[in-house]
Image (spheres, rainbow, N blue to C red):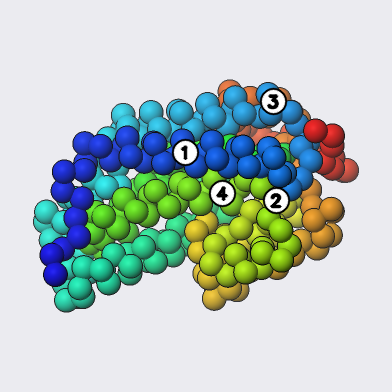
Amino acid sequence: MAPLSIQGWPGGEASLRLGIFAGCFLVLALAEGLAPSRRRTLRRAQRWPGNLGLSLLDSLVVRFLAPAGAVGISLFAESRHLGVLPLSGLPPVARVILSLGLLDLVIYLQHRLFHAVPLLWRLHRMHHTDLDLDVTSGARFHPLEILLSLGIKAGAILALGAPPIAVLMFEIVLNATALFNHSNLHIPARLEPWLRCLLVTPAMHRIHHSIRPEETDTNFGFNLPWWDRLLGTYRQDPAGGEEGLSLGLPEFRDATESRIDRLLTQPFRTPPTVEEDPPKSGPS
């Protein structure tokens, strides 16, 4: 069987990913507008400029500092025959499937690392200060976290020798599922448990954004829900139920923290005084 490859794609890889990202964003933004799961605390005009501005900045930083990206790293590994998978003797399709699963495990472990290490948490906590979750929250990451994440993925890709086609597929799926599981899309109660067996759903990931630390340190998965179940970090429901679930962090409750300048400087600032009674979800 001929090996799977993306020969001829690298020049259009960025356009392909951008097109799929934009399509997923528009579909989910429309869907969550028509069938929202929760009432918003802040208006979109207070949150979307910061979240989308970060997404644009992240893309520009990666393009400037690491123009080849994860796919370019996999092409380099393939050209040098690096990694364990090329030595495994497995057929190309098996190497692709195994790469997708292992890269997802790496992202799960990376996510736990960013919660466990105080210095990394200072970067990652900005993602958790969003007082609402919607499709834009899936793109709300500090540029330094994005670069560190790319470095971790690069190491995993080189160690595995993950095929470029697998890396491209993984990057596309990771972006799409991040938008999906952060969205405010309502999924019918009868469908949600079944869907949660295959994907991290918005309701599952929303618990991870709880204001309660014991809930924030659960449900770390982005794509597959299985790692949380296998490694003991899965939580079925929030302690107070969906109605009692407050999002964000107690240290950053002011609406001004959603401005892009505040988001970028947040890891380097001392948190303000914690409010005793964090606000619940308010009117739309």
Judged left or right of residue 229, residue 9 is left
- Of callouts 1 and 2, the N-terminal one: 1
Instruction: Give coordinates of residue 5: x percent, y percent.
Output: 19, 55
- Of callouts 4 and 2, the N-terminal one: 4
| Viewer-nearest of discs 4 and 1 | 1
| Viewer-nearest of discs 4 and 2 | 2
Kindly report the distance in space between the C-alpha atoms of the residues bearing marks 3 and 2: 22 Å
Kindly report the distance in space between the C-alpha atoms of the residues bearing marks 4 and 1: 12 Å
Residue underneath mark 4: 180
The amino acid on which the numbered mark 2 sits, given as a three-letter code, is: His
Q: Residue at the spot x=14%, y=70% of the render? A: 1
Q: Does residue 97 sit above or below 24 in this rendering? A: below
Kindly report the distance in space between the C-alpha atoms of the residues bearing marks 4 and 2: 11 Å
Residue underneath mark 3: 46
Q: Residue at the spot x=38%, y=49% of the render? A: 171
Q: Does residue 243 sit above or below 62 in this rendering? A: below
Closer to the camera, 39 or 120?
Answer: 39
Residue underneath mark 2: 186
Instruction: Give coordinates of residue 202: x percent, y percent.
Output: 64, 53
